[in-house]
Image: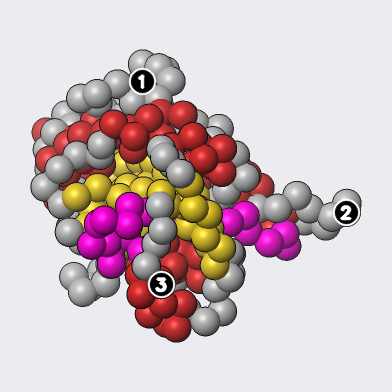
Amino acid sequence: MSTDTRTITVGIDGSRSSLDAADWAAREAQRRRLPLRLLHAGTEPAVPGGVFDADDIDDIDVPAGRTRAALDRAAIELSYAHPALDIIARRTATPAVPALLAAAVEAETLVLGSRGRTGSAGFPVGSVALGVAARADRPVVLVRAGELPEDERMPVVKGSPPSTAPYLPVVLGLDPDASADDLIGYAFDTAAVRSAPLHVVHPWALPTSTLRPWRHRFPGTTVREHRVDGDPGPRLLEASARAGLLVVGRRTGRGPGRAARSLIRHADCPVAVVPHD
């Protein structure tokens, strides 16, 4: 794979949530026409057994289907579901957080499951997923266990396949005081690749200059603004129940704030955490 080609990268740890995240990542890679990279990090095998011993694999890129059983199974299942998708599976002995942070540098988006082996709901502070989302240089999408392809689309007309239904809106939580071009650009681009509407939720009045250049750049995207007096968190949480993706920001060099962490724990759709100035 060319080093100039960004990927959609997903962390695989053998848990059900990571496999659901991989399925979401495959759909995102297909939408964006990018390769999909599956990454298992750490010295513990994804599941017992496999093709290689842990000592034999350290930062080695191999074709999909040649790594340990969980990684192998995910790659095979995704290749059947998305036969045109370029899938590469990789295993590294590097601990999970540094390995995922390094992978994010080369990724368009890094995707992680929101529940690990503990089965706990949401993200305990200090977990791998929240730790990566707090430090990654690229957007990190957190996908809850049980997320299905039809969950990101409108209800289907009786007798129609789910894949023909329009996508649900992308919801952007925006702080008017932030310089957030990376955040806004990610939300507009994500809505555009899905041909989905973009709903922007913000407190107080938003200067018209904030969204105007993005509306011009993405003229085919329907944009609706929702002004909230006070804390926008409850409105964003409510909107997540009818959204395909919730997009929130964090300042570069800082982790997600308390409001963003609450949304990560409780949102009813995948959450994208986007670093910005």
Q: Is residue 118 magenta?
A: no
| Residue 2 in picture, x, y percent from top left | 22, 73
| Residue 45 in picture, x, y percent from top left | 26, 28
| Range of magenta residues | 164-184
- Which numbered dot is residue 208? 3
Q: Looking at the rendering, in which quadrant would you find the N terminus?
A: bottom left
Location of residue 1 with respect to 69 vertically, above or below: below
How far separated are the C-alphas under marks 1 and 2?
38 Å
Q: Nearer the viewer, mark 3 or mark 1?
A: 3
Q: Amino acid under label 3? A: Thr
Provide the residue designation for mark 1.
Answer: 117
Location of residue 42 with respect to 48 vertically, above or below: below
Question: Left or right: where does residue 70 sit relative to residue 192?
Answer: left
Residue at position x 51%, y 71% from top?
Answer: 192
Q: Residues within 10 Å of mark 3 (few under 14, many from 20)?
A: few
Provide the residue designation for mark 2.
Answer: 159
Is residue 150 or residue 40 the one in the foreground? Answer: 150
